[in-house]
């Protein structure tokens, strides 16, 4: 059984995707950007959107098993470390950080998460 979760974000309709897909015992959350002026503000905002999708799917960020971070400037990743440590706590997922271009120059970070469903 596959279930799709939509957050109503502007790019979901423009591009044709959903925020998350629940399938095969996992929650696959699409790359998510957040609003704000700084990489830290955007990181926190993106994680809130992700948390909402994962929660709607029936899991939590404690169930995250994989996270990918995409940043146009790798030097901006380090300011996010305390936020990520706080959010993922004692159950951190496997992680990868990639330096790349994002869909709009205003975005400083995009985060993609895979979580397993509890049970």
Image (tube, rainbow, N blue to C red):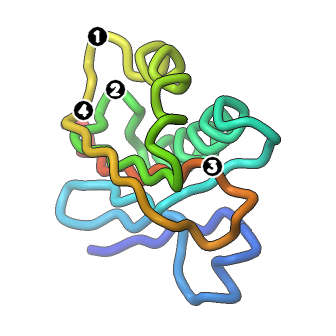
Rendered image quadrant of residue 85: top left
Q: Residue at x 26, y 74 (%)?
A: 1
Rendered image quadrant of residue 66: top left
Distance from label 3 to label 2 (Cα)? 25 Å
Camera-near label (3 vs 2) is 3
Residue, disc 4:
93
Rendered image quadrant of residue 10: bottom right
Residue, disc 3:
108
Label 3 or label 1, whichever comes before in sequence order: 1
Q: Position of residue 80 (x, y in %)?
A: 52, 26
Q: Residue 94 vs residue 12: left or right?
A: left
Question: Which structural element holds mark 3?
Answer: loop
Camera-near label (4 vs 2) is 4
Distance from label 1 to label 4 (Cα)? 10 Å
Question: Which structural element holds mark 2?
Answer: helix
Q: Residue at x 52, y 55 (%)?
A: 72
Frontmost residue, 96 versus 115? 96
Residue, disc 1:
90
Label 2 or label 1, whichever comes before in sequence order: 2
Q: Are marks 3 and 1 in contact (CB under 8 Å)?
A: no
Frontmost residue, 60 versus 92? 92
Distance from label 3 to label 1 (Cα)? 26 Å
Q: Residue at x 19, y 36 (%)?
A: 94
């Amino acid at each position: 059984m596959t279930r799709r979760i939509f957050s109503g974000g502007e790019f979901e309709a423009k591009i044709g995707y959903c925020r998350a897909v629940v399938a095969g015992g996992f929650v696959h959350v699409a790359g998510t950007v957040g609003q704000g002026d700084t990489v830290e503000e955007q990181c926190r905002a993106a994680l809130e959107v992700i948390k909402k999708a994962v929660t709607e799917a029936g899991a939590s960020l404690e169930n995250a098993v994989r996270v990918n971070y995409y940043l146009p400037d790798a030097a901006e990743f380090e300011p996010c470390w305390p936020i990520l440590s706080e959010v993922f706590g004692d159950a951190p997922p496997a992680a990868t950080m990639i330096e790349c271009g994002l869909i709009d120059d205003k975005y400083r970070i995009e985060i993609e998460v895979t979580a397993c469903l509890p049970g």
